[in-house]
Amino acid sequence: MSPHDMVLTRVGLRFQGRCYPCTIGRGGLAMDKREGDGATPRGAHRIVGMLYRPDRMARPADWALPIRPGDLWSDDPGDEDYNLMVRAPYGHSHEALRRADPLYDLVIVTDWNWPKAERGRGSCIFIHRWRRPGYPTAGCIGLRPGHLRRIAAAIRYETRLIVR
């Protein structure tokens, strides 16, 4: 492990000497993640991207990309673009990245089942804002908004999400 890693512990997400309260998937932790199971996959996951809503916040890091109207994330295992960012119109199952609520105003993207997705193994695991303390995600890691912004600004190229 590197001192730049984020490590999920029983009490929160440890990063740079601090422990941040967080939420995980409603399905708990899983070694064998499947699409729709709500689980957070165990393992070491590289950070491969950061997305943000430029109409709601300043760029959190110089490498963050804006979420535009029509940006979606494919979660349809039957489609060739499974587990990739796609654009509307898109005729397959997907998640809207530009949401009315603030859940995806800032999204840290991991390499779970990416870039060459194994169909049905689960779409991307994001680190994003939580809905509220203790409320589970669909498999992602949820954080308080201020903590998420602090972590986003401090991520380095070598940072990984470690889920044991």
Image (cartoon, helix red, strand yellow):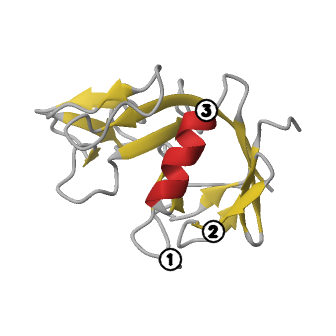
Classify 10 Å Cα crowding around label 1: few (below 14), some (14-19), many (20 and above): few
Mark with earlier residue (3, 2): 2
Residue located at (19% from left, 38% from top) = 55
> Circles 2 and 1: CB distance less than 8 Å?
yes
Examine the rendered structure and indicate whether residue 124 appears above or below residue 66: below
Mark with earlier residue (2, 1): 2
Pick whichever, 161 or 37, lies toward us: 161
Residue 149 position within the rendered picture, expressed as x and y whole percent measured from the top left = 49, 46
Q: Amino acid at mark 3?
A: Ile
Q: Nearer the viewer, mark 3 or mark 2?
A: 2
Q: In the displayed structure, does residue 128 sit left or right of residue 155?
A: left
User: Which mark, residue 32?
Assistant: none
Provide the secondary structure element on which disc 3 rests.
strand
CA–CA distance in space, label 3 to label 1: 24 Å
Which residue in the rendered view is the most extreme toward the bottom? Answer: 134
User: Which mark, residue 133?
Assistant: 1
Classify 10 Å Cα crowding around label 2: few (below 14), some (14-19), many (20 and above): some
Residue located at (77% from left, 45% from top) = 16
- Does residue 80 show up? no
**Residue that numbered label 2 is attached to:** 21
> Circles 3 and 1: CB distance less than 8 Å?
no
